[in-house]
Amino acid sequence: MNTPRVLFQFDTDDQPSTFDGVVAVDAGVDHLFRHGSVTPENVASLVHGAMFTRGAKALRSTAIFIGGTDVLAGEQLLSKVTSTFFGPVRVSVMLDSNGSNTTAAAAVVTAAQHCSLMNCRALVLAGTGPVGRRVARLLGRHGCDVRIGSRSPQRAEQAAAEISVGLKDSSIHGVSTAGDDALQAAMAGCQILIACGAAGVTLIEQTTLDTAADLKLLIDLNAVPPAGLEGVEPTDKGRRDARERICYGALGVGSLKMKIHRRAIEHLFACNDAILDAEAIYALGETLLG
Ligand SMILES: NC(=O)c1ccc[n+]([C@@H]2O[C@H](COP(=O)([O-])OP(=O)(O)OC[C@H]3O[C@@H](n4cnc5c(N)ncnc54)[C@H](OP(=O)(O)O)[C@@H]3O)[C@@H](O)[C@H]2O)c1
């Protein structure tokens, strides 16, 4: 008999995410143990329970998922969880606080389906948040020339500098997107535009968007009306607009995001030492393309 698959859901919020719980079950987890209000201070005993209960061969049937709305808190929890393991006594871990890693991976896998990232320039609009930072890093890691847009040039430059750490030969720069003139300058020469703005905020109006002659692909990750990119509908999934630009909305990217999330959960049980961060999750997303 196969050892049952056990997933520990460690959530930094008081209430563990029901969304993450459902995806875990749909990905074939046999037993889901959900914990809320998990912090670096209280997680060690939970990790010990996960790593000391099964023999070496069965450890791959236990895994940990870290979620919650606070992405920074999730990153800190991941760091504590991985430092609690020792030697081969460990289990696989996935981080997807606020869906940031799976969403960013889905957006960049989608972009790579339409453009050769190695030879492209992309503007990541409102790229200073958790999703935008991950999108920018994934694009930069795959050879894309990346501009991170922000209403604040200082925030843009700071995000670009932080994201570039550890990336060799990457080209990631911060640009201001405050006002139409700045937006037009930021879009000039870009083939890809990925909007990562806060929910329910229009970042760019259609008339301004239409001044960008080089854009070929528009992706808007905001699912909450009004659209982040005016004219791109949440349900767009490869639709060509009047200017022949390929459009994806949040729901259009969302189906791939869900597939990537399930694939990543399945992968947790392939070994006992996987650490699924944005880049590992992106690599799994690539394998979903036929
Ligand atoms: N489908 C999914 O499962 C899923 C999962 C995660 C996220 N998302 C969506 O992905 C998008 C990005 O998520 P996130 O968590 O990274 O977003 P976020 O942190 O809430 O916001 C991202 C950036 O938007 C800019 N912004 C905030 N308020 C603004 C305003 N009033 N006007 C203009 N710009 C504003 C800020 O950049 P500056 O201040 O630097 O300009 C901020 O850093 C959101 O729309 C979110 O709903 C979807």
Image (cartoon, helix red, strand yellow):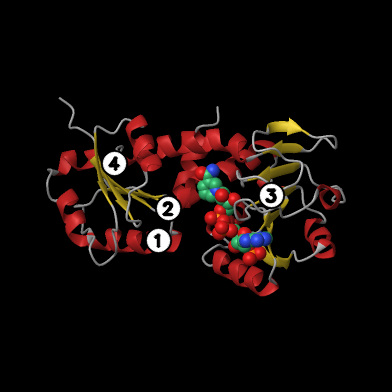
Which residue is tagged 1? 75
Tell whether 241 sits left or right of 164: right
Which quadrant does the C terminus fall into? top right
Q: Specify whether residue 127 is in view.
A: no
**Does label 1 or label 2 sit earlier along the sequence?**
1
Q: Is mark 3 within 8 Å of ligand 1?
A: yes
**Does label 2 or label 4 sit earlier along the sequence?**
2
Q: Are marks 1 and 2 in contact (CB under 8 Å)?
A: yes
Which residue is tagged 2? 97
Which quadrant does the N terminus fall into? top left
Disc 1 vs disc 2: which is toward the camera? 2
Question: Disc number at residue 271?
Answer: 4
**Does label 1 or label 3 sit earlier along the sequence?**
1
Q: Are marks 1 and 4 in contact (CB under 8 Å)?
A: no
Q: Is mark 4 within 8 Å of ligand 1?
A: no
Instruction: Residue type at mark 1: give it.
Output: Glu
Which residue is tagged 3? 228
